[in-house]
Amino acid sequence: MEAKAARPKPKRIPYGMMNFVAIREDNCYYVDKTRFIEKIEDANKYFFFIRPRRFGKSLTVSMLQHYYDINQQEKFERLYGDLYIGQHPTPDHNKYLVIYLNFAVIDAELDNYRTSLDAHCRDEFASFCRRYAHLLPAYCMEEIMQEEGAVRQLNSLYKICDDAGLKIYLFIDEYDHFTNHILSDAARLEEYKKETHGTGYLRTFFNTIKAGTYSSIERVFITGVSPVTLDDLTSGFNIGTNYSLAYGYNEMVGFTEEEVREMLAYYSQHHEFHHTVDELIEVMKPYYDNYCFAEEAYGETTMYNSNMVLSFLYKYIDNGCRIPKQILDENIRVDYNKLRMLIRKDKEFVHDASVIQTLVSQGFVTGELKEGFPAEDIAKSDNFVSLLYYFGMVTIGGIHRGRPKLVIPNEVVREQIYTYLLDNYHDNHLDADPYRLGQLEENMAYDGDFQPFFRYIADSIHTYASQRDRQKGEAFVHGYTLALTSQCRFYRPISELDNQGGYADIFLRPHYEIFTDMAHSYIIELKYLKSPATDAQVAAAVSEAKAQVCRYADTVNVGKQIGQTALHKVYVVYRGVEMVACDTVASVSNEE
């Protein structure tokens, strides 16, 4: 009997890898983004680029570093030969001495950051002198190390390079790390301003970079996640251009759906996939897709979060090519903990007038996207909306009355925002018992017993409002209901907007691919009436809710959306903070 030929070893999935050389030399799968090198070269030589965390910025910086590093010339064919830029090299490849500064490793505490910045720069400048010792004057290392602090050392370094006729390409990754940390502590804002304005140390450092561009610093590429520091340092480095909202760079980091499909198709040839590429896209798309980083690109291309895609693919293959039970990347929760301190600037939360509350209850917010704004103005509406946009918490979803319409991009971000809501409810003494909720959710999924779950929500809302002795509105009822349903491991809540705005229905789409024995799914029509509503008005709302939930159920592709489960059409009606109706109209099974 003829032996079956062994499959070639597939490329490694580069989840969490940010070193371009390691990816290329360790047989990793690489999504080719090198075509953007030409565009970057044609742009302003001093390039700012902002994207959300874990979107591939550091890998992009690494790819550019090695492309331009004069010491990497002998590796050019090995690293880039089969990529776009290897077939279309620019004259500038391997022509620069490269400085790479990673501000993420600098201690961001105000009391320590200057010392930490000096230490990081001293180490990097010393490494620079060693790497390029064959090109630099023999006295370079000694002269630079004699200088005190990052500012003086950088000043000395670029002048030595200029005297030697050498050109520098400076890369700064996470340039705003210090700012994002300090902004979480409003009490220290004045101290922060001293460092980023006037003769402040960070501002002086960027002034030195600017001075170096008149000398040997030929190009600068700076990345981060927010535009706050950029604005505060404007006069310190006012020659840079922010390309974060530019149409031509919409696809430079992250993955297009075409790139995701190509990757899935590749690995399906090397593993026994239990799903087609289309089926996997259907699972991944609601969670990782739908980012748009330029208004002009809306309707053309949406971007997947690359880190999330790689995490899912790794877990899928490691799980025997089965859909992983944990679709969210746990590292995103770490980022959320960092972000939470910043979005507490949304200080009107407890008065139901916050941007986050509007986003959840209305389904979108509008605002002018700002390229930069000072730290002290972060709480202004347009600035705060812009900050959420740069952090990837909202994305461009169209135009509303002439302004960008900003929506929650996907279910991963929705879970983060709802977690934020629940944390704020908790801070205001509205708590939910995770263990009790877990039992109620399980009863919903397997026994069809949904009323105790919604009664638990209603009791929590009523108790909280009574303790506060003030009326809570529709946004509060909708927001809390959605926040709790979003935590349910058996379902993904999908909310649709009616023509008047506000949530009309919630479809609890079952995770039947994961929980193959669950039996029940739900569509909920949630109605809200103000406290003075009469019984007759309640009866009318119930009648309307029944009709609407049935009409909406007819639009659901039953076979594709609910799997083996029975679909229940549920209506829930509130009068103020009292739930006055919660029942089902009928059930629809997948066999019907």
Image: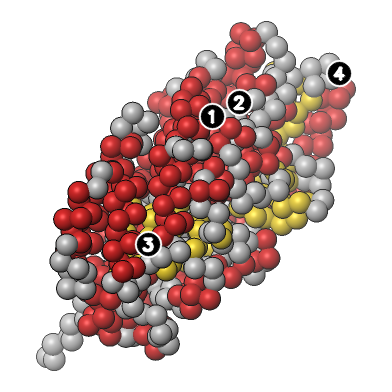
Which quadrant: the C terminus? bottom right
| Mark 1 or mark 4, earlier in chain | 1
Q: Secondary structure at mark 2?
A: loop
- 463 to 584, vertically: above or below: above
Which residue is label 2 attached to? Answer: 347
Residue 254 in the image, given as x and y percentages of width and height? 47, 63
Q: Residue at x 55, y 23 (%)?
A: 425
| Total count of labels | 4
| Cα gap from disc 3 to disc 4, whole angstroms | 69 Å
Q: Nearer the viewer, mark 2 or mark 3?
A: 3
- Mark 4 is surrounded, within 10 Å at the Cα level, by few (under 14), some (14 to 19) or many (20 or more) other residues, namely few
Residue 321 in the image, given as x and y percentages of width and height? 32, 63
Q: Mark on residue 344?
A: 1
Tell me which amino acid carries mark 1. Arg
Q: Are marks 1 and 2 in contact (CB under 8 Å)?
A: yes
Q: From the viewer's perspective, is 145 left or right of 99?
A: left
Q: Nearer the viewer, mark 2 or mark 4?
A: 2
